[in-house]
Image (tube, helix red, strand yellow):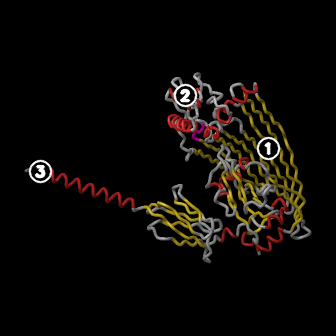
Amino acid sequence: MKTRQKSRDASGILLVCLMWMLSLSSSLHAQTWNINGNVTDEQGEPIIGANVVIQGTGTGTITDVEGNFKLASVTKGAVMEISFIGYISKTLQVKDASSLKIVLKEDNQALDEVVVVGYGVQRKSDLTGSVASVNSDVLESRPQANLIQSLQGAVPGLNISVTGSNAEGSSTTTRIRGNNSITADNKPLVILDGIPFDGPWSEINPNDVESIEVLKDASSAAIYGARGSNGVILITSKRGKKDRLTVSYDTYVTIDQPINLPRMMNGKEFYKYKSEAFKATNTTPPTEENPEPWLDNFTPTELAMYAAGQSTDWMKLATQTGIKQQHNLSFRGGANKTSYFISLNYTDVKGTAVGNEFKRYNVRFNLDQEFNSWLKFSTTTQLGRYDRSGSSASFWRAIKQVPLGRAYNEDGSLTLSATEDSSSAFSINPLGSLNNKTKDIRAKVITNNVLEVKFPFIKGLSYKLNTGFTYQNSSYKNYQGLDTYEGASANGVLNTDDWHSEEWILENIIAEFNLQMQQNSD
């Protein structure tokens, strides 16, 4: 009798514990909600493209054309930050699942900032054209080796599409107001410190940038002519500050992990799929010597791999954990009538594709010298060395290649052909390009020198002599030896491409911008 009583007590305690755990699980599950919201300005107009981010997480979104946004599975107590260029950012703590109505106030201080527009400067509040601005604080909060990646989602009207993933992040397409032509180039005109810049975004050190202005309407064409028909991106580098020296060193290391890779068949699954497919279309009668004639469609390597129970995961072999590291040292200062900015940058990126690497060495020297009240000289110079040497594994071959292909020989060397397929598109080893001996190095000098004269006898009239010079030297060599499929087929293949280019620009500008700015200040 006592034993049965203890058993009933134990069962009751267990039942209470289970009910408590279920209640706790239900309670915890109820602490996350799907949040809906709307973001407007003080006049009730929807703000398009505002950033909505849950602080401390990678969760975020942007508002649509109606100013609406949605966030899924937001934890109670999380802090949500809403921001948009030209407005004061706002933070809210998530307390319930109700629909949120958020109003952002204009940042009047930002409207008083002076921005670069074409050949001069103007206050934001006085602008009649469509201009979006990004300052160095935004870039510093989004550390990237490639400048264009730091601008994603930060500039309204600037569409940045990622078309691929490589070490330097250059597989992007940049558009302002969409595509304007079917056959012509639609990329915007990029002006770096007064000089047209036509190189990859990765050749600009983001740490050197003070501000970026995007001219999006017809005013850009009015200033730059046909070159500005696709919009203009103005990049201004940092300048020195008088009466103090600031030494800055910043570094970061990031890790890139390939995600959302397609699930490929393993060797056993592929063998079954291919067998059933050829069996269904087989027209050769089975015999005692060949009871399964459809197996003749398998290559010797495929049969050997299947018999040995082996399988090759090509996507795993072709990808790796990418690592980005950047080191930047800068000196900013000045005294009396002289100010300077000097920076040194080293960037080393290993992409998510095996063998894909990029290294950048940048040196910048900006100097402003006032000789007297009416004569000023300034120089903006960037020296760069960009190393894109090495060859990476082929993603598209890795996706196409069969899992019963062989990647390595018995001695550990890469096979020329993964299988004996008659088509080179399906037989070449996706890792074979790692044996290519590639050297791809480019050196570039960009310098802009300005002499500015404010005529003392004509108030408000100024003359500016703007001289720009860009020099590039490229050295490319690629050798495919006998240990590669292409090299073995042609007894070795060597491709070289060495060239250099020089571009000059000379502008004589007479303007009254100084008088206009003085009148606006008054």
Residue 286 screen position, x and y as percent: 53, 29
Estimate the spatial distance between the alpha carbons at disc 2 and disc 1, rounded to whole Å. Answer: 53 Å
Can you see residue 405?
no
Residue 226 screen position, x and y as percent: 84, 61
Instruction: Between residue 468 and residue 261, name the one nearer to us.
Output: 261
Under mark 3, the amino acid is Arg
- Tag in front: 2 or 3: 2
Under mark 2, the amino acid is Leu
Q: Dot 1 corresponds to which residue?
A: 444
* Structural crowding at the residue carrying mark 2, measured as other residues with C-alpha within 10 Å and reported as few (<14), some (14–19) or many (≥20): some
Instruction: Between residue 170 and residue 434, name the one nearer to us.
Output: 434
Q: Secondary structure at mark 1?
A: strand
Residue 435 screen position, x and y as percent: 67, 30
| Quadrant for the C terminus in the image | bottom right
* Structural crowding at the residue carrying mark 1, measured as other residues with C-alpha within 10 Å and reported as few (<14), some (14–19) or many (≥20): many
Occupied quadrant, residue 518: bottom right
Q: Is residue 164 magenta?
A: no
Under mark 1, the amino acid is Lys
In the figure, is residue 72 to the left or right of 456? Answer: left
Occupied quadrant, residue 128: bottom right
Can you see residue 520?
yes
In the figure, is residue 460 to the left or right of 279? Answer: right
Magenta part of the chain = 317-321
- Tag in front: 3 or 1: 3
Occupied quadrant, residue 150: bottom right
Q: Dot 3 corresponds to which residue?
A: 4
Disc on the earlier residue, 2 or 3: 3
